[in-house]
Amino acid sequence: MEDKVKIKVTIAGRTYPLKVTADEEEHVRKAVDFIDERIKLIEKKYAIKDIQDVQALILLELASELNYLKEKQEIDARVLEEKINHLLQI
């Protein structure tokens, strides 16, 4: 079991203490940077000041993208499986 390190991240002006593995720390910090960039972009693009509305829009964007990628992965997996089955029949 990998040891956990304590880190603090700040999102939208609020600080969150987390325990993550050393491997996860870089990914978490990159995610925080991504969220901060999205917050700034949405606040500017839509002139929204209520952070809860900004966060809801970010969640919507991410959920939509995740759903798209999952569907694409399923389609790609089916296509690959069909090609493999075709090659096995040859």
Image (cartoon, grey):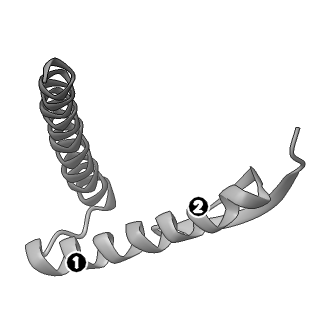
Residue at 74% across / 51% down in the picture? Answer: 20
Numbered badge on residue 57: none
Instruction: Please tell me which residue lies in front, 31 or 55.
Output: 31
Camera sees residue 14: no
Q: Which residue reaches farthest front?
A: 90
Residue at 13% across / 75% down in the picture? Answer: 47
Pick whichever of labels 2 and 1 is earlier in the sequence: 2
Q: Position of residue 48 (x, y in %)?
A: 17, 69
**Quadrant of the image occupied by residue 38:** bottom left
**Quadrant of the image occupied by residue 85:** top left
- Marks 2/1: CA–CA distance: 20 Å
**Quadrant of the image occupied by residue 53:** bottom left
Provide the residue designation for mark 2. 28
In the rendered image, the quadrant that contains the N terminus is top right
Instruction: Please tell me which residue lies in front, 44 or 85.
Output: 85
Q: Amino acid at mark 1?
A: Leu
Q: Position of residue 49 (x, y in %)?
A: 24, 70
Q: Amino acid at mark 2?
A: Val
Instruction: Please tell me which residue lies in front, 66 or 79.
Output: 79
Numbered badge on residue 41: 1
| SS for dot 1 | helix
**Count of marks overlaid on the render:** 2
Camera sees residue 2: yes
Q: Position of residue 46 (x, y in %)?
A: 9, 72
- On screen, residue 12 versus residue 24, left or right, reads left
- On screen, residue 3 versus residue 57, left or right, reads right
Q: Position of residue 40 (x, y in %)?
A: 29, 78
In the rendered image, the quadrant that contains the C terminus is top left
Q: In front of the other: label 2 or label 1? A: 2
Residue at 15% across / 18% down in the picture? Answer: 89
Residue at 57% across / 62% down in the picture? Answer: 27
